[in-house]
Image (spheres, rainbow, N blue to C red):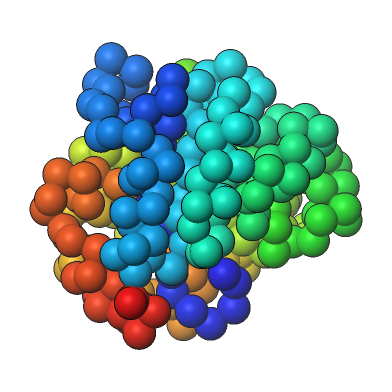
């Protein structure tokens, strides 16, 4: 999933065994879209290159709650699964990778540079993605329930120094809003030298084209959630916009 290709990741956000969407990560904004394994299979059958699976219960609890569902998803599709949500201890990251995740997103625990460096030493930078969630320029942590005083770009620079190569960058205020991606924030993130997967705010194919044009500078993918689930964008069009339609069945 790393190196030269721009990847469109349909989001499969899990809460209490259901596939849901939230707006700005707020639990009371939840809408249910069926069952996660069926939804994962649906996107794979539609030609998805990879999936972005999030354990929302884990993000709020601080440890993964849905590794069984992750294992079922990974077993049911033949494409890579990127997984995040509550991965703050090394044993939980090992369990997620052991449950079939091709790579994991580490957010709150990425504040500890030494810890993040150890993860990269153990599993390699291509399997450990820095989850950098921002509210403005400040880091949002603990399932986005808290905003840290740290500047998200400074945190990214520190992680680059300990071997990080890839970051999932989410502008929390835009997530689930279909208000457009945070292109300015993404461009600032690219100055760190990290490859960036953009997340939050995608409205349609034009936004994916905009992000794919940044691929030579280091944008390596986009996570798309609400636009796909609301029908504002179909996956085939998203793949064409991202240049990945050749992967479709």
Query: Which quarter shows the C terminus?
Result: bottom left
The foreground one among 48 and 29 is 48
Residue name at image x 48 percent, y 70 percent:
220
User: For the point 38% across and 61% down, which residue is it?
Assistant: 44
Which quadrant is the N terminus positioned in? bottom right
- Decide: is 249 above or below 48: below
Q: Is residue 128 left or right of residue 181?
A: right
**Looking at the image, which residue sits at the far left?**
232
Quarter residue 70 falls in: top right
Residue 120 in view in this figure: yes
Above or below — where is 39 with respect to 244? above
Q: Nearer the viewer, residue 49 or 61?
A: 49
Q: Position of residue 5 (x, y in %)?
A: 48, 79
Report the number of numbered marks: 0
**Residue closest to the eye, 86 or 180:** 86
Percent position of residue 149, x then y: 57, 27
The picture quadrant where one finds residue 15 is top left
Estimate the x, y position of residue 85 in percent, counting from the top left.
56, 33
The picture places residue 198, in percent across and down from the top left corner, at 41, 57
**Seen in the image, is 212 located left or right of residue 87?**
left
Seen at 34% across and 18% down, the residue is: 27
Q: Is residue 86 left or right of residue 241?
A: right
Residue 137 visible? The answer is no
Q: Residue at x 74, y 45 (%)?
A: 98
């Amino acid at each position: 999933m790393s190196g030269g290709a721009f990847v469109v990741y349909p989001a499969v956000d899990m809460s209490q065994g259901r596939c849901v969407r939230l707006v700005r990560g707020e639990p009371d904004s939840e809408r249910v879209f069926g069952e996660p394994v069926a939804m994962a299979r649906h996107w794979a059958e539609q030609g998805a290159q990879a999936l972005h699976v999030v354990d929302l219960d884990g993000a709020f609890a601080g440890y993964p709650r849905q590794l069984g569902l992750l294992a079922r998803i990974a077993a049911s599709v033949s494409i890579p699964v990127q997984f995040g949500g509550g991965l703050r201890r090394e044993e939980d990251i090992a369990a997620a990778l052991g449950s079939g995740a091709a790579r994991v997103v580490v957010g709150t625990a990425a504040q500890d540079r030494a810890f993040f460096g150890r993860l990269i030493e153990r599993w390699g930078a291509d399997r450990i993605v820095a989850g950098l969630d921002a509210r403005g320029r400040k880091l949002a942590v603990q399932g986005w329930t808290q905003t840290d005083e740290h500047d998200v770009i400074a945190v990214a620079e520190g992680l680059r120094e300990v071997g990080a190569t890839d970051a999932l960058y989410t502008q929390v205020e835009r997530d689930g809003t279909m208000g457009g991606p945070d292109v300015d924030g993404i461009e600032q993130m690219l100055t760190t030298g990290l490859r960036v997967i953009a997340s939050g705010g995608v409205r349609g194919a034009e936004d994916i084209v905009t992000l794919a044009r940044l691929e030579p500078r280091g944008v390596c993918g986009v996570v798309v959630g609400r636009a796909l689930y609301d029908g504002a964008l179909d996956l085939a069009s998203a793949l064409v916009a991202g240049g990945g339609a050749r992967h479709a069945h």
